[in-house]
């Protein structure tokens, strides 16, 4: 069967030879667009698979299982994509082969891998697999960056305490997300992002002095987000470096100073919308947006909904 949200649909009656299209359409709706072939499984009496995606604010949490099949993320799907996801895949059971940039990784129960939807990739499920998949919009990484974020791909160290903690948390979250009140979802989302940051930091840390400088700058920015005087120049002066050096530190991770400050101010504003009754105008002013209209436009671009609509979901 295939599971879409809380709805279940039986795969019975799907003609042999059509199950690849059926599964492909389910993945496109609930996960990401992929070309899929299930010819080997079509020889069986029944091909079974399920996918269920739930929202964690702007994140996606996807429970996925399927019988042996194969597929790939094509160049066309990459170029046509309107969303840019970083995906963490935690394998619960089964085995599959994942290929990126010509390098194949065999994964099984307990393994954790990263995938960037901006990159082509191939997969082959060798034994029926179950996994929890975390989809993070790349723009969210600006909230915790502090280091270079590479083009994601490959396995994490499965025995790392921070990786084990993240996987345990995702498993618990998958079991309890439906019961969480709306007011707790944002906190769960932020905790997920912090745990993800800790789990991948060992792969991305830069040993050079620029990494330490970036961490110091990030901490300073977080302490001055409500200050209208926060600027590239003020950050440079506070760290006794040139503005060009600050720009270069951000550029190493493909970011800009302004985009990072904007992302973090929007994240703080979102928390105010959820936790306080302050007006949208006062929140916009507190976090240094020029006016409520400007704030609302940037908020909708970032989170896909207006501040008013976001606040109305509070319980």
Image (cartoon, rainbow, N blue to C red):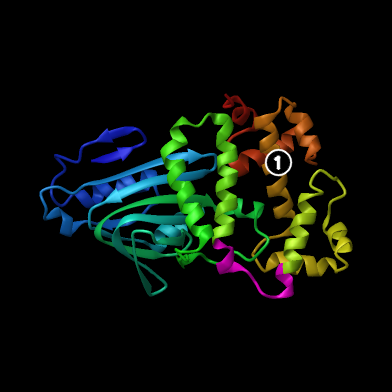
Side (left or right) of 273 relative to 284: left
Residue 26 occupies quadrant: top left
Side (left or right) of 209 relative to 56: right
Q: SS class of the residue under badge 1? A: helix
Alpha-carbon neighbours of circle 1 within 10 Å: few (<14), some, or many (≥20)? Answer: some
Give the main secondary structure of the magenta stretch.
helix
Taking the spot 45% from the left edge, 61% from the top edge, the residue there is 115
Residue 106 occupies quadrant: bottom left
Residue occupied by mark 1: 268
Numbered range of the magenta stretch: 200-211
Q: Is residue 299 above or below residue 36?
A: above
Q: Quadrant of the N terminus?
A: top left
Side (left or right) of 286 relative to 22: right
| Image coordinates for residue 274, horizontal then vertical, percent | 65, 31
Q: Is residue 271 visible?
A: yes
The verdict on residue 204 being magenta is yes
The verdict on residue 283 being magenta is no
Q: Is residue 296 visible?
A: no
Q: Quadrant of the C terminus?
A: top right
Q: Is residue 210 above or below residue 51?
A: below
Q: Is residue 43 above or below residue 246?
A: above
| Image coordinates for residue 111, horizontal then vertical, percent | 39, 61
Nearer to us in this view, 205 or 73: 205
């Amino acid at each position: 069967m295939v599971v879409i949200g809380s709805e279940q649909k039986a795969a019975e009656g799907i003609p042999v030879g059509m199950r690849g299209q059926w599964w492909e359409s389910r993945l496109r709706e609930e996960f990401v667009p992929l070309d899929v072939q299930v010819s080997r499984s079509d020889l069986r009496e029944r091909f079974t698979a399920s996918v269920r995606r739930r929202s964690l604010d702007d994140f996606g949490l996807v429970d996925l299982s399927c019988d042996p099949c194969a597929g790939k993320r094509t160049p066309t799907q990459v170029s046509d994509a309107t969303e840019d996801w970083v995906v963490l895949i935690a394998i619960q059971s089964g085995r599959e082969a994942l290929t990126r940039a010509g390098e194949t990784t065999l994964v099984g129960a307990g393994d954790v891998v990263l995938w960037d939807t901006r990159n082509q990739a191939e997969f082959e499920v060798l034994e029926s697999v179950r996994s929890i998949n975390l989809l993070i919009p790349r723009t969210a990484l600006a909230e915790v960056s502090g280091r270079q974020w590479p083009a994601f791909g490959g396995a994490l160290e499965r025995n790392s305490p921070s990786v084990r903690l993240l996987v345990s948390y995702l498993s618990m979250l998958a079991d309890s997300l439906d019961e969480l009140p709306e007011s707790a979802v944002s906190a769960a989302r932020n905790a997920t992002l912090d745990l993800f940051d800790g789990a991948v930091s060992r792969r991305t840390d830069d040993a050079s002095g620029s990494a330490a400088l970036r961490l110091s700058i990030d901490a300073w920015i977080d302490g001055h987000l409500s200050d209208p005087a926060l600027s590239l120049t003020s950050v440079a002066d506070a760290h006794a470096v040139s503005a060009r050096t600050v720009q270069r530190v951000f550029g190493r991770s493909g970011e800009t100073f302004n985009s990072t400050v904007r992302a973090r101010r929007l994240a703080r504003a979102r928390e105010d919308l959820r936790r306080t009754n302050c007006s949208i105008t006062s929140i916009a002013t507190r976090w240094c947006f020029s006016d409520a209209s400007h704030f609302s436009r940037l908020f909708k671009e970032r989170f896909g909904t207006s501040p008013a609509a976001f606040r109305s979901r509070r319980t």
